[in-house]
Amino acid sequence: MTWCVRHPRPVVAGAPEGDVMVYAKILVPIAPGYGEEAHRALKVARSLLTPHGRITVISVIEELPAYLTMDIYYAVDPSVRENQMRVGESIVEAFTTDDVEVVTRNGHPTRAILDEARRGGHDCIVIPSAQPGWEHYLLGSTAAGVVRQAHCSVHVLRQPEPKDA
């Protein structure tokens, strides 16, 4: 079930005059190597949230390829699994607040984000998008997959253009 509430706030393009679409449950994917765009995404999510809404930050740690996940590999380099755990713990520590729940998942980022959005009943996803290369013309690959397949609204944040010096 999707909740979408009209709430008087500053006018936003596409909304009726004087109203803006706001959401009750917003999912914000944060990459394990997050930067300033993660904090921007959280700020935007808060601006789109209903007064008693909830934000969930999700960080997805990609699975290692099958040929690297053999017990022999971890025996040779046990720091791989430890590093994955530390990354997840640092995101939980950095983003957990009274209005934000943080979850970490292992797997393919696009699939894990879409699964969490559906499982959690989120009505909006606010996702930062990396600067694309030729292979992803307009969006990064994860953001593009989320936009194409999401059951709910998706708000994509582009990185600001660099200022000329």
Image: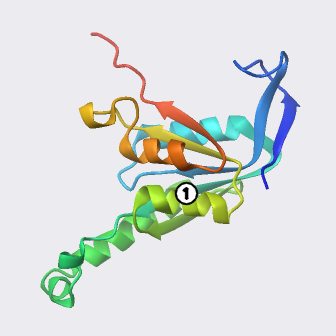
Quadrant where the N terminus is found in the figure: bottom right
Identify whether 34 is placed above or below 135.
below
Secondary structure state at the residue bearing disc 1? helix
To which quarter of the image does residue 96 belong?
bottom right
Instruction: Estimate the x, y position of residue 134 in percent, counting from the top left.
Output: 25, 31
The quarter of the displayed image where residue 67 is located: bottom left
Total labels: the figure holds 1
Q: Is residue 116 left or right of residue 130?
A: right
Residue labelled with disc 1: 114
Q: Horizontal placement of 151 versus 51: left or right? A: left
Residue 90 x/y as whole percent: 43, 62
Which residue appears at 35% of the width and 52% of the height? Answer: 33
x, y percent for residue 60: 44, 61
- Residue 7, compared with residue 100, is above or below; it is above
Residue 124 lies, with reference to residue 116, above or below; the image says: above
At label 1, counting other C-alpha atoms closer than 10 Å, the crowd grade (few under 14, some 14-19, many 20 or more) is: many
Say which residue appears at 65% left-offset and 56% top-offset: 97
Q: Amino acid at mark 1?
A: Leu
Which residue extends farthest left? 76
Tell me which residue sits at (65%, 66%) in the image: 119
Residue lying furthest top: 165
Q: Quadrant of residue 69?
A: bottom left
* Of residues 165 and 158, the one drawn nearer to the viewer in this rendering: 158
